[in-house]
Image (cartoon, rainbow, N blue to C red):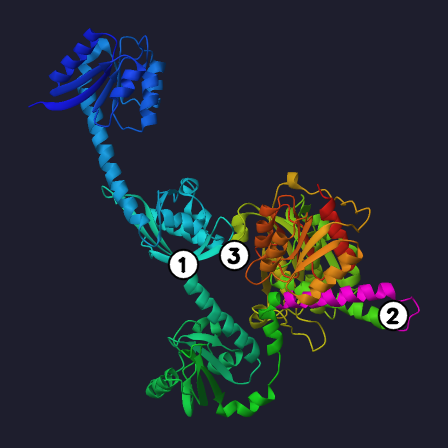
């Protein structure tokens, strides 16, 4: 039985064509054929129903390489076999690269039949695979979730349209890149850990939640379900189905934000205050609840209330039912502590209701009857201070806005007051006080790791040596200072001013621990990654590290104190002797510098603070340079000023107006975009706050620069976020002025940005 075969033969010799047809018939084919010699004939007969093309490599009017090119242009999948009397190996390889299925010499035509059979089978496999891929693509394109097919190395092989929409990258740009490159750092680490576990044969939970970083920098909360792909029993890849859960996360975040605001207000209360969501899981647990019941908030958040004894369960369920109906309850009952003991309490619960009147949870208050009087005596203790620590970054932002206005207005006022004016001392006092307050906000920013770092590659030994004289004056003559530098330079990438602050704060802490005198030792050393990791049990960048050790022979501390020393406002000193921010500042600076810190101490045996910083190459060392000051700080350029805080906006407008600039103002990004669209003239500079509702300053700048390519941008903020800063370092090419600014510093920075090439 023969197989029909439609063949297009590109051959100038009829005899050679007949030999090819003979071999095809001998291989079981019944050829329906057409011989052509020119490009026009070839194109006229080139059709999708052609089964095979047999082409001489070189013809007087036409050749195989041109035929292959035309076949590619028509996008037809037709087996193409080069049959030539003479062909070099290089020419044959070139034909194969251009899409030929095979090649053979005319004196070996016995290979033609098997070659055609093989080429047809290859096409059948390709078509089958294409059909499967098309069905798979249809399914993947019509589901609501993003689909990512990954190879064994975690690289993207395929993603659907939803995957493009989710990430902002077209499939072509995603193909070949690691899936974790699309995730936030913590999600990337988890994805790599899971892939490694799967490759080593471990069982892994298929689902986890993380955030995708879109092409435009926006973070999208996602839920990922990842399964293994097998072929012939072998693991060949992973399939990730990713769902956008931003809406759900926003709802959860809104609930958490509400809980945090409540926590700030009620953490100083002398009663246990517990909030629950609509599933009656704990979402708020104040300090008094921890003191009264024993569990800390990290143990109970997101869990069912653990305090209900079995014999009071029905009573509690009845109260829950009342709350669900929108009814408050008040009753005397018992609650179980973490240690198992029971306490008598008064329980008061009230439903939490949203704007639509729907019950979304419950707020409960527990009063320990045995300790009620004692709690009243402890009212308004250090809870408010701890609340400030929890909200350090946000407070610094608002506080810096206030300080900007206070400092800026007093600066302007002083320029108008004569030296002998009776009000001048008071105004100067206001300015000095504002400057001291600015120091406090910098400490809060350091703790919350939200300050801008001016990173330089420096020798840690040099930093220590540069402040040795200050240290000796600081600790006093009753304490011996010993400095033990490493034998070779310890190159680290740090902000020198911040690292000096770390050493000074630790030295002050050591001095206060040695009131009767003692020895303070500051040591630097080179350590290996394994040693650093073993000692700190914390993450540190790959590569060798530099150790900064500050050791004293003071009174030491208990384990209880040691575990709390980095908390903001925690101090063992008497009232009025320190803010409790010194070590919190150290902790924030070290972490923001990519390092880690460990404390070793026992009562009566002194304390040792060990800081590990990633070591860098000496070739990266930074040479100190002084930026040239602007020759003048005024100008006549047009500036678009965007600031949501009205007082700060008015101050900046007045300052720059006095400098001669033409100011346009907006209170939010949407208004700024409208102002820009309505202004037909040139805008030389966008001066914008970073943190604003709805749209960040970075997003606004990107939008306006796209419309006005020559627009220069200067960001200002008292609280940085990932819009312009990563790990405390400004994005390359980003101009920034820190709040609180003075009229002089703002004017100089504006002029500097405008004059920059």
User: What segment carries the magenta color?
Assistant: 395-423
**Which residue is more in the foreground, 43 or 309?**
43
Residue 471 in view here? no
Relative horizontal placement of residue 199, taking residue 684 as reference (left or right): left
* Label of residue 209 in the image: 1
Foreground mark, 1 or 3?
1
Relative horizontal placement of residue 245, taking residue 439 as reference (left or right): left
In the picture of the structure, the residue carrying the numbered disc 3 is 538
Is residue 674 rendered magenta in the image? no
Q: Which element carries disc 1, helix, strand or loop?
A: strand
Residue 383's quadrant in the figure? bottom right
Is residue 414 rendered magenta in the image? yes
Residue 584's quadrant in the figure? bottom right
Q: Residues within 10 Å of mark 2 (few under 14, many from 20)?
A: some
Residue at (68% x, 59% y) in the render: 665
Residue at (65% x, 38% y) in the render: 619
C-alpha distance separating marks 3 and 2: 53 Å
Q: Position of residue 290 (x, y in %)?
A: 49, 78
Foreground mark, 2 or 1?
2
In the picture of the structure, the residue carrying the numbered disc 2 is 424
């Amino acid at each position: 039985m023969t197989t029909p075969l439609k063949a297009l033969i590109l051959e100038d010799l009829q005899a050679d064509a007949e030999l090819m047809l003979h071999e095809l018939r001998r291989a079981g084919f019944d050829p329906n054929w057409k011989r052509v010699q020119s490009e026009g004939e070839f194109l006229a007969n080139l059709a999708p129903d052609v089964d095979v093309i047999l082409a001489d490599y070189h013809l007087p009017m036409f050749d195989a390489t041109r035929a292959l090119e035309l076949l590619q242009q028509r996008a037809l999948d037709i087996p193409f076999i080069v049959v030539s009397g003479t062909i070099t190996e290089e020419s044959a390889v070139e034909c194969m690269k251009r899409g030929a299925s095979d090649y053979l010499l005319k004196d070996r035509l016995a290979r033609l039949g098997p070659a055609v059979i093989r080429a047809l089978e290859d096409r059948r496999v390709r078509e089958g695979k294409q059909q499967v891929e098309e069905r798979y693509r249809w399914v993947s394109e019509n589901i609501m979730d993003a689909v990512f097919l990954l190879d064994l190395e975690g690289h993207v092989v395929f993603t659907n349209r939803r995957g493009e929409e989710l990430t902002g990258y077209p499939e072509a740009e995603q193909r070949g890149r690691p899936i974790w490159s699309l995730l936030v750092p913590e999600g990337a680490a988890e994805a790599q850990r899971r892939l490694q576990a799967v490759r080593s044969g471990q069982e892994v939970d298929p689902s986890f939640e993380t955030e995708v970083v879109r092409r435009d920098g926006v973070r999208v909360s996602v839920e990922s379900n990842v399964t293994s792909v097998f072929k012939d029993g072998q693991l060949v890849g992973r399939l990730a189905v990713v769902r956008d859960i931003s809406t759900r996360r926003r709802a959860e975040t809104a609930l958490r934000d509400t809980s945090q605001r409540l926590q700030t207000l009620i953490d100083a209360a002398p009663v246990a205050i517990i909030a629950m969501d609509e599933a009656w899981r704990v979402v708020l647990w104040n300090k008094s609840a921890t003191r009264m019941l024993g569990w800390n908030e990290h143990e109970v958040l997101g869990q069912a209330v653990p305090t209900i004894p079995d014999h009071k369960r029905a009573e509690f369920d009845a109260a829950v039912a009342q709350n669900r109906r929108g009814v408050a309850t008040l009753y005397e009952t018992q609650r179980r502590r973490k240690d198992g003991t029971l306490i008598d309490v008064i329980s008061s619960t009230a439903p939490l209701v949203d704007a639509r009147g729907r019950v979304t949870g419950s707020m409960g208050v527990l009063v320990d009857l045995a300790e009620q009087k004692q709690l009243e005596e402890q009212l308004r203790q250090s809870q408010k201070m701890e609340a400030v620590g929890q909200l350090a970054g946000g407070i610094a932002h608002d506080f810096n806005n206030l300080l900007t206005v206070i400092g800026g207005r007093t600066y302007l006022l002083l320029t108008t007051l004569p030296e002998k004016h009776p009000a001048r001392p008071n105004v100067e006092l206001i300015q000095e006080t504002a400057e001291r307050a600015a120091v406090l906000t910098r400490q809060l920013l350091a703790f919350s790791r939200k300050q801008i770092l001016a990173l330089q590659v420096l020798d840690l030994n040099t930093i220590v040596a540069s402040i040795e004289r200050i240290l000796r004056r600081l600790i006093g003559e009753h304490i011996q200072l010993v400095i033990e530098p490493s034998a070779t330079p310890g190159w680290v990438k740090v902000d020198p001013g911040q690292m000096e602050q770390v050493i000074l704060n630790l030295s002050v802490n050591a001095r206060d621990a040695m009131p009767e005198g003692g020895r303070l030792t500051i040591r630097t050393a080179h350590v290996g990654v394994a040693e650093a990791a073993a000692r700190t049990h914390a993450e540190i960048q790959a590569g060798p590290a530099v150790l900064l050790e500050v050791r004293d022979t003071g009174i030491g501390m208990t384990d209880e104190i040691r575990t709390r020393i980095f908390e903001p406002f925690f101090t063992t000193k008497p009232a009025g002797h320190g803010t409790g921010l010194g070590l919190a500042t150290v902790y924030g600076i070290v972490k923001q510098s990519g390092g880690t810190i460990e404390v070793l101490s026992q009562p009566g045996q002194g304390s040792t603070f060990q800081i590990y910083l990633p070591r860098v190459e000496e070739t990266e060392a930074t040479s100190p340079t002084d930026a040239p000051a602007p020759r003048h700080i005024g100008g006549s350029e047009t500036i678009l000023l965007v600031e949501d805080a009205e007082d700060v906006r008015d101050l900046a407008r007045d300052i720059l107006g006095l400098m001669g600039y033409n100011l346009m103002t907006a209170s939010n990004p949407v208004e700024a975009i409208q102002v820009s669209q309505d202004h037909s003239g040139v805008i030389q500079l966008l001066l914008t706050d970073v943190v604003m509702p709805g749209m960040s300053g970075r997003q606004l700048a990107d939008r306006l620069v796209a419309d006005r390519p020559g627009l220069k941008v200067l960001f200002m903020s008292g609280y940085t976020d990932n819009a312009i800063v990563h790990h405390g370092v400004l994005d390359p090419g980003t101009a920034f002025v820190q709040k609180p600014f003075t009229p002089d510093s703002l004017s100089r920075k504006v002029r500097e940005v405008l004059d920059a090439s």
